[in-house]
Image (cartoon, rainbow, N blue to C red):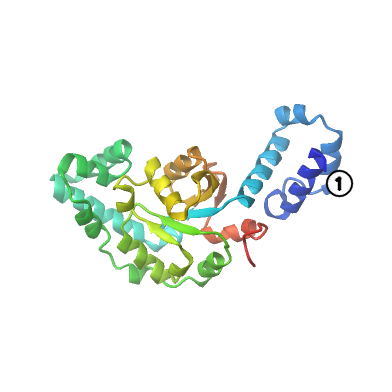
Amino acid sequence: MTLVEFLFYEIVRVDHVIFQDRWPNFQGLYDYLVFSDLEQDVINNPKWCLAVCETGKILQLKKARGILFDLDNTLYPREKGVFPSINERISDFVRLSTRAENGAVETLRRDYREKYGTTLGGLMRHHAVDPDEYLEYVHDIPVERMLARDDSLASFLESIDLPMAILTNGSMRHARRVLDILGVSQYFDGVCDLAATNYLGKPHPEAFLAAAALLKVPLQETVFIDDLPVNVQAAGSFGSLTIHVNGKGDGVGDIQVQKVTDLVDIFSRLPWYRM
């Protein structure tokens, strides 16, 4: 099979998933590939560049050996209000532990996130905060009243025939509570929580490497799914194929979807997804 034929059939195979609005005429696409100067077109034609790029993503997905999922605002919609509640308690904890005035709390948190990746990293370094005390406090929220069993999520995860793990900057207890409430604990091979990364967390490379080690899969052969651009970009720089949930067309990540179960449309064409 020639390069032209290979790219043509690969593009056509996923056309209804990704290329539906870009290559409506299969014969036209084939003629374009056959009669064009490929090297020149790759350089000069944005449409062709996009086709080659998207095909590469599908090929990388086919070769994936494991998937790393973020937890909060990724497995469930941010509209559920879980993370805003956690966020409020983080600010409360910062206020209590640093005696910062209300107006200074958010500035301090932003400064710590930029320097250390997480608010906790700054609190540990500058205020000798006990990380377990912090995690217990900020996750003390009524998750059971905010979330419920999600059968569509369970069906999606059950169809994935790859090892999967959670990579979260939260605590193990919080992660287990959320997974149990959603009814999806059984689909994950493990949880890499903040403690497992020596409290560094995402976007530090140690967090991604620890999670990949949990799956016993090289990071370069994983798919990483998260809602935060900084984490998606970090995972991509370490070699993962990245998926941005709630991306809203911002261009962050290799693939963008509004909610995680939207990935059924793409995953259903991959050899490791069982319908």
Above or below: residue 227 compared with residue 185: above
Let me know if residue 244 appears in the view: no
The picture places residue 268, in percent across and down from the top left corner, at: 65, 60
Observer able to see residue 139: yes
* Residue appearing at x 64%, y 51% in the figure: 62
Q: Residue 43: horizontal and vertical position, in percent? A: 71, 27
Residue at point 27%, 60% (across, down)? 139
Q: Quadrant of residue 190?
A: bottom left
Which amino acid lies under the numbered mark 1 shown in the image of this protein?
Gln
Dividing the picture into quadrants, the one containing residue 205 is top left
At x 62% / y 58%, what residue is drawn? Answer: 267
Tell me the quadrant of the picture where the C terminus can be found: bottom right
Of 18 and 217, nearer the camera is 217
Against 64, residue 162 (above or below) is below
Q: Residue at x 55, y 41 (%)?
A: 251
Give the quadrant of the N terminus: top right
Q: Is residue 123 left or right of residue 114?
A: left
Label 1 sits on a secondary structure element that is helix
Picture quadrant of residue 274? bottom right
